[in-house]
Image (cartoon, rainbow, N blue to C red):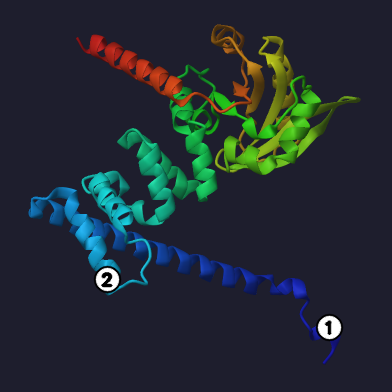
Amino acid sequence: MSEELIPKTSQFDEIISIIDQARCRALKAVNAELIRMYWDVGEYLSDLCTASGFGDKVIDKVAAYIAEHNPGIKGFNRRGLYRMKQFYETYKDDEFVTPLVTQVSWTNHLLIMAGSKSAEERHFYMALCVKERYSKRELERQIDSAYFERYMLSTQKQFPNLVSNNVRSSILDTYVLEFLDLPKDYSEHNLRKAITLNLKDFILEFGKDFSFIGEEYRIQVGEQDFYIDLLFYNRALSCLVPVELKIGKFKPEHIGQINFYLEALDRDVKKPNENPSVGVILCAGKDDAVVEYALSRTMSPTLVSDYTLRLPDKKLLQKKLRELTDLALEVGESENE
């Protein structure tokens, strides 16, 4: 046979894709059936506990019966059965979760139930798991870093009119970068290098819709070269996202720099089918009033976020979120009077 008729091995990539897609569908189907089984067992136990008059104590007898008649089965001890009952009772009247519940793994369901304080928080993490396809480790990290509280606090901030709702929901007000393990006295160079060396964790925190393009990305304007600290592309927003890193507090002059980069990207790098670029200034601290003044007259979609190198105090963020929610309710009630 002529070598010209033999297909190149690179053409065989399609078969790998077929196998991977089939495996993915099979895993999803298995997970869906497992979740339905846990739901049905939970419903049975809930009804049994209600009817027996002994409450959850009857679960001990069920666990002993399963251990005696099917000793090889795993996960159906008292603790496992109680979790199935809790799972059913948590979501049985919750219409929001109906299309999502079988798309989340059992392990992640347990993390969400254990780590969430409200139905809204459970909904948030469940939808996020489906969208981002979180592993157990990834979801655990997001719950530990108070991702829900930080997201909700971000959405309640005031933004310039040029910033769309999609942008506001894609970029947080505060990022947690505890995984960088930076020295006590670090430079912007140290910060940038640490981010690129820990890019997988940074993308988890920044958002999986972000794709990394490069660090110190060179743009040429006139006869001069300029370098953007980090450049990303956001698939959901369909735009370039330059990120400028600052190890100090936000200063108004930072706006001029990022606006210059946005203009250069939109003129020379952005493709015709892409949306205008969105800038992010990531700094070690900020005064919200200074940020508001600095952004009030800018014509470019720019957001100022700060970062912390330690996991936040979840209770403090939960308290702040409750206060803002209560304040918003009070304002709404006064406007309706």
What type is the residue that disc 1 sits on? Glu
In percent of width and height, residue 177 lies at 63, 30
Looking at the image, residue 17 sits to the left or right of residue 25; the answer is right
Q: At 87% across and 24% down in the image, what residue appears?
A: 222
Q: Is residue 184 above or below residue 27?
A: above
In the picture, the disc for residue 68 is: 2
Of all residues shown, which one is farthest toward the right? Answer: 223
Question: How packed is label 2: few (under 14 Cα within 10 Å), some, or many (20 or more)?
Answer: few
Image position of 204 (left or right of 180) = left
Q: Which quadrant is the C terminus positioned in?
A: top left
Across and down, in percent, residue 90 comes to: 26, 45
Residue at horizontal 77 percent and vertical 19 percent from the top: 185
Image quarter of the N terminus: bottom right
- What residue is shown at x 14% (from left), y 49% (from top)? 55
Q: Quadrant of residue 121?
A: top left
Q: Earlier in the sequence, mark 1 or mark 2?
A: 1
Residue visible at 22% across and 13% down in the picture? 336
In the rendering, which numbered label is found on residue 205? none
> Element type at marker 1?
helix
Classify mark 2: helix, strand or loop: helix
Q: Of all residues shown, which one is farthest toward the bottom? A: 1
Q: Looking at this view, is 19 or 71 the one in front?
A: 71
Q: Nearer the viewer, residue 219 or 92?
A: 92
Q: Is residue 121 visible?
A: yes
In the rendered view, tell whether residue 116 sits above or below residue 29.
Answer: above
Indicate the position of residue 193 as horizontal and vertical percent values: 78, 33
* Amino acid type of the residue that numbered disc 2 sits on in the rendered structure: Glu
Name the side, left or right, on which 27 lies relative to 299. left
Residue 118 shown left or right of residue 158 in the figure: left
Q: Label 1 belongs to which residue?
A: 4
Against 155, is 213 above or below? below
Q: Residues within 10 Å of mark 1 (few under 14, many from 20)?
A: few
